């Protein structure tokens, strides 16, 4: 899908606040409400909008511990990787899983209610994972920046 500057403006607004009313969004991107709604529907239906969610404050809902874990598998055969990915998808504590190039095979972002709970999770779930060679954990002490917004306007400046 080719995106024009109006599509990018709509996406930038929706990334900042997906609950914005169509009338307000239309005014912000200089479109009529009907034209804006038509574009938003196109962007949602098979377009670049994957999903719209509420982003929670982890500490306020009882999940204050964030851990970055690096995982190396014994085997990187297709079957071993698929088995590991299936296991990870089934673990709600794993917020993100990225297959990476380098010394490790996967980087995981994991949330927990406490450090002992994370330790139990790591031993029980990561330690017993299929074909796991090793894993390391970095406990996040503070977060300087967190965003889900892509810098859409930067590609036009390049």
Image: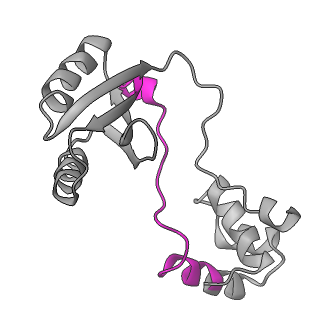
Could you say which quadrant of the image residue 121 lies in? top left
Q: Residue at x 63, y 57 (%)?
A: 15
Q: Quadrant where the C terminus lies?
A: bottom right
The residue nearer to you, when weighing 11 against 136, is: 136
Q: Position of residue 97 (x, y in %)?
A: 37, 45
The residue at the far top in this view is 116
Query: Can residue 93 be seen from the camera position used here?
Result: no
> Is residue 86 found left or right of 12 in the rendered image?
left
The residue nearer to you, when weighing 114 against 71, is: 71
Could you say which quadrant of the image residue 48 lies in? bottom right
Q: Residue at x 17, y 27 (%)?
A: 127
Could you say which quadrant of the image residue 30 lies in? bottom right
Residue 67 on the magenta segment: yes
The residue nearer to you, when weighing 72 against 121, is: 72
> Is residue 27 found left or right of 11 in the rendered image?
right
> Is residue 96 found left or right of 74 in the rendered image?
right
Relative to 69, say whether 107 is above or below: below
Q: Residue at x 45, y 46 (%)?
A: 101
> Is residue 85 found left or right of 21 in the rendered image?
left
Q: Position of residue 5 (x, y in %)?
A: 80, 76
| Number of disc labels | 0
Please provide the residue range marked out in magenta.
Answer: 39-68
Residue 127 on the magenta segment: no
Q: Quadrant where the N terminus lies?
A: bottom right
Q: Position of residue 72 (x, y in %)?
A: 30, 36
The residue at the far right in this view is 157
Relative to 113, say whether 81 is above or below: below
Q: Position of residue 65 (x, y in %)?
A: 39, 21
Q: Residue at x 58, y 49 (%)?
A: 148
Query: Can residue 110 be seen from the camera position used here?
Result: yes
């Amino acid at each position: 899908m080719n995106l024009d500057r109006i599509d990018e403006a709509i996406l930038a607004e929706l990334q900042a606040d997906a609950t914005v009313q169509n009338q307000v969004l239309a005014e912000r991107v200089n479109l009529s409400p009907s034209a804006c709604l038509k574009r938003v529907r196109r962007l949602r239906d098979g377009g670049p909008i994957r999903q719209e969610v509420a982003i929670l404050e982890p500490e306020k809902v009882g999940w204050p511990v964030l851990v970055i874990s690096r995982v190396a598998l014994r085997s990187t055969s297709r079957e071993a990787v698929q088995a590991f990915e299936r296991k990870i998808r089934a673990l709600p504590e794993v917020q993100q899983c990225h297959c990476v190039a380098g010394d490790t095979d996967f980087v995981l972002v994991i949330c927990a209610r406490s450090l002992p709970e994370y330790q139990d999770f790591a031993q029980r779930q990561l330690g017993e994972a299929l074909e796991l060679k090793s894993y390391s954990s970095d406990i996040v002490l503070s977060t300087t920046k967190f965003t889900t917004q892509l810098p859409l306007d930067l590609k036009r400046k390049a």
